[in-house]
């Protein structure tokens, strides 16, 4: 009886440890599978990065050229550029106001046009007279 109790006590201590080991193993296997599934995407991303090295090199060269231009620029050039950019910003702000005004004008017209279109679609189709305009005189004209 003492042996059975000692074994039961040992099992109670070992079972949680064994369950924890199994859970850890299952979690590690799941993470390993996630990594294995992510490898093709990582390879594709690396290929894209390798293909863009020329673009990165050109960007770095452009940055060097820009630094050289900024060192050579005078305060007059910078002032002129600032004024030009301010005029462009003002023009864009005016355009935004014009677009907003146009939008508020056109939006109600769009709804009215759609309603008119539905009304026209409900009118029964009648045969329409087609007049040829050419060498002959059009009907109803004096000739």
Image (cartoon, rainbow, N blue to C red):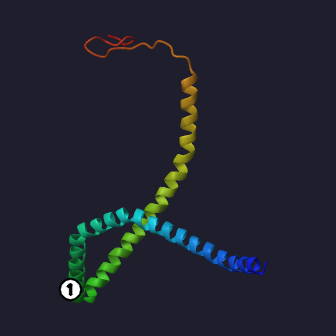
Residue at point 57% right, 38% down?
Answer: 112
Residue at point 32% right, 63% down?
Answer: 44
Question: As rendered, which of 70 and 116 lies closer to the eye?
Answer: 70
- Residue 78 as seen in the image, left or right of residue 90: left
Count of picture labels: 1
Question: As rendered, which of 64 and 93 lies closer to the eye?
Answer: 64
Q: Quadrant of the C terminus?
A: top left
Residue at point 37% right, 65% down?
Answer: 39
Residue at point 55% right, 17% down?
Answer: 124
Q: Position of residue 36 (x, y in %)?
A: 40, 65
Identify the image quadrant of residue 9.
bottom right
Question: How many residues crowd mark 1 within 10 Å: few (<14), some (14–19), many (20+)?
Answer: few
Identify the image quadrant of residue 51.
bottom left
Residue reaching furthest to the right: 1
Identify the image quadrant of residue 109.
top right
Q: Quadrant of the N terminus?
A: bottom right
Instruction: Give above or below for 82 relative to 33.
Output: below
Q: Position of residue 98 (x, y in %)?
A: 47, 58
Q: Position of residue 89 (x, y in %)?
A: 40, 71
Question: As rendered, which of 18 and 35 lies closer to the eye?
Answer: 18
Instruction: Give above or below for 30 relative to 69.
Output: above
Q: Secondary structure at mark 1?
A: helix
- Residue 77 as seen in the image, left or right of residue 130: left
Q: Position of residue 60 (x, y in %)?
A: 24, 79
Question: As rendered, which of 92 and 65 lies closer to the eye?
Answer: 65
Residue linked to disc 1: 68
Instruction: Give above or below for 109 relative to 96.
Output: above
């Amino acid at each position: 009886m003492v042996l059975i109790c000692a074994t039961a006590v040992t099992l109670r201590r070992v079972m949680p440890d064994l369950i924890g080991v199994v859970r850890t193993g299952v979690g590690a296997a799941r993470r390993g599978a996630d990594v294995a599934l992510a490898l093709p995407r990582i390879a594709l991303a690396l290929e894209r990065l390798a293909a863009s090295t020329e673009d990165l090199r050109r960007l770095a060269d452009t940055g060097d050229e820009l630094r050289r231009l900024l060192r050579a620029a005078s305060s007059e050039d910078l002032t002129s550029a600032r004024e030009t950019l301010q005029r462009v910003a003002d023009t864009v702000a005016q355009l935004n106001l014009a677009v907003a005004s146009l939008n508020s004008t056109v939006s109600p017209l769009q709804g009215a046009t759609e309603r008119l279109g539905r009304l026209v679609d409900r009118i029964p189709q009648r045969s329409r007279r087609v007049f040829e305009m050419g060498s002959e005189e059009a009907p109803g004209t004096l000739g």
